[in-house]
Image (tube, helix red, strand yellow):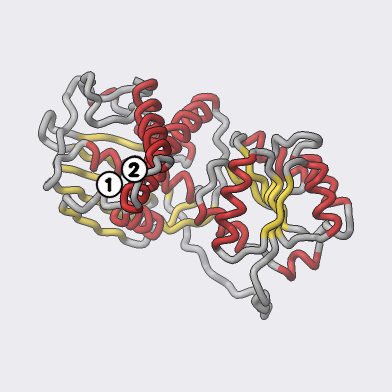
Amino acid sequence: MLGHELRNPLSAISSAASLIGLAGAGPDTVGRAKMIIQRQSQHLSRIVDDLLDLSRAMSGKILLARQATDVSTLVGACLETFRATGRTGNYSLNVNLAPCWVDGDPTRLEQIASNLIDNALKYTPPGGTIGILIAEDGDEVVLTVSDSGVGISPELLPHVFDVFVQGAITIDRAQGGLGIGLALVRRLVELHGGSVSARSDGAAAGSTFEIRLPRALPLQLAQDGLDRAAPAGKPTVLLIEDNDDGREMMATMLDAYGYAVSYAADGVQGVEMASNNAPDVALVDIGLPGIDGYEVARRLRMDPATRGVKLIALTGYGLAEDQRRVLEAGFDLHLVKPVGIDQLLEAIGSWDPLAAAAK
């Protein structure tokens, strides 16, 4: 099942890449091929993320970055993503999102909501109904996702949150997936001090999933009294990455968004370039030849000329221990590959010239 789920998107990506290289491929064909590559890459990335998160959850290595979070705003944004990608077009949606606050990790809470909504869409035929409700119940915030889909048999219902469990699995794998989404939901909810439950009257009777989380006080947004001037222009960026294709694509992408980008292929060269012409932001891979990204960060922080550079780690290492090592080495942010362009632009855009000058 795992081989099937990994090879399918890889096959589509390989075929689309070959199609782009054909001499007779027209603009429309190339455009469709590019969309296929993007869509299947995102699908493959979700599978890898689920597998890694499952490993972290089972070994107790998920680290929550807690903050006061309005669940309704988070779920609403998640739902907009499904709408933007056309996933909800053939369904009737009943949505009621009351403002409710919890002390939680926004990324993990979004993962919970995305898995539940994705599950409802996956197992509900087009024309069905999806309900999403957020409300307060005493000291708890309750998120309910219901559907009019295929339902859950009485035999399966007690096991829906177990790892690698789905309904009847056939060779065509029509629904797809690895059967670990709900297991992740349960573990992430438990880490937040909450509970999750599932209800269904049986096959073809739809299903309802309910998440309960401890309620928190709303975040009071206070002004710090500082009149911060906006930077005159976009920050300059140094990219230190040894993968040739990855370096070329990221530099090209940032250039397209108007950033002045310089780049280096190893740690020593990166430190030299930063020392000679200090950038505002440095994107640093961890697994570099010569000296690794940790040493790059330490050297840049020791040099008065580069001490104020905003350091962002770009790495394939995503465990809590990896994040700790990154921050201890002097990085400001830890981003796990593959990094979406929106996430990358947000990280670069958080550069603050006043904070940099204060270092």
Query: Residue 45 sits in which quadrant?
Result: top left
The reply to whether dot 1 and dot 2 touch (C-beta < 8 Å) is yes
Q: Which residue is mark 2?
A: 211
Residue 222 vs residue 174: left or right? right
Q: Which mark is residue 49?
A: none
Mark 1 belongs to which amino acid?
A: Thr
For this rendering, which residue is in front, 105 or 302? 302
**Residue at the front extreme?**
23
Residue 233 visible to the viewer:
yes
Where's residue 257, x and y in %?
55, 63
Where's residue 183, x and y in %?
38, 30
User: At 30% from the left edge and 42% from the top edge, which residue is drawn?
Assistant: 118
Quarter of the image with the N terminus is top left
Q: Secondary structure at mark 1?
A: strand
Give the distance between the C-alpha atoms of the residues marked 1 and 2, in whole angstroms. 6 Å
Which numbered disc, 1 or 2, marks the residue that appears first in the sequence? 1
User: At 84% from the left edge and 50% from the top edge, which residue is drawn?
Assistant: 272
Where's residue 6, x and y in %?
40, 27
Residue 43 visible to the viewer:
no
For this rendering, which residue is in front, 142 or 84? 84
For this rendering, which residue is in front, 159 or 354? 354
Q: Which mark is residue 144?
A: 1
